[in-house]
Amino acid sequence: MQRQEGCFRVWTDDSGRKIVYSEGTGVAKAHEVEWLYNTICDITNDWHDHDWAYIAYIEKLQQVSPKGSSRYIRLHEELAAHNCKYIAYIEGNSYEVSVQAARHKEASNTPTTTNKYFTTVDEALEWLSGLGF
């Protein structure tokens, strides 16, 4: 089942898989990143007994400031705290943004999540399936 919740898509199926999708464009300001993780955590609040995945379309995003970076680090921490196990970034050809996203993951010290970068969402879904998700 798929539903739209604001600018997010939330997908679940009978086997218990749960995925939240979002797409960013332009420069995300610190307060917008904070809103992002707060909203994702609200959407997934009742999923604590399930592993879930977050798919972020980042190909239209620009790099962020140090203040924005601190919020993205917090995003990783908050998602991990809410039982997110996988984060797939759909980067297209935005290499610079994916490098910055990798730094945010490393700085967050969240070993319970696995992150990977893809050109297409189909590749990300195949990766998740290969992980048994």
Image (tube, grey):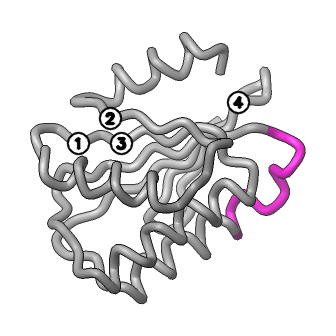
Q: Quadrant of residue 80?
A: bottom right
Disc 3 to disc 2, C-alpha distance: 5 Å
Q: Are marks 4 and 1 in contact (CB under 8 Å)?
A: no
Residue appearing at x 63%, y 44% in the figure: 111
- What SS does tag 4 mark? loop
Disc 1 to disc 3, C-alpha distance: 6 Å
| Disc with the residue nearer the chain's start (4 vs 3) | 4
Q: Which residue is mark 4?
A: 17
| Disc with the residue nearer the chain's start (4 vs 2) | 4
Q: Nearer the viewer, mark 4 or mark 3?
A: 3
Residue 21 percent across, percent down from the top left: 47, 48
48 is higher (above) or lower (below) than 14: below
Q: Which residue is mark 3?
A: 89
46 is higher (above) or lower (below) than 116: below
Q: Are marks 1 and 2 in contact (CB under 8 Å)?
A: yes
Left or right, residue 97 beside residue 129: left
Mark 1 Cα within 10 Å, few/some/many (few <14, many 20+)? many
Q: Which residue is mark 2?
A: 117
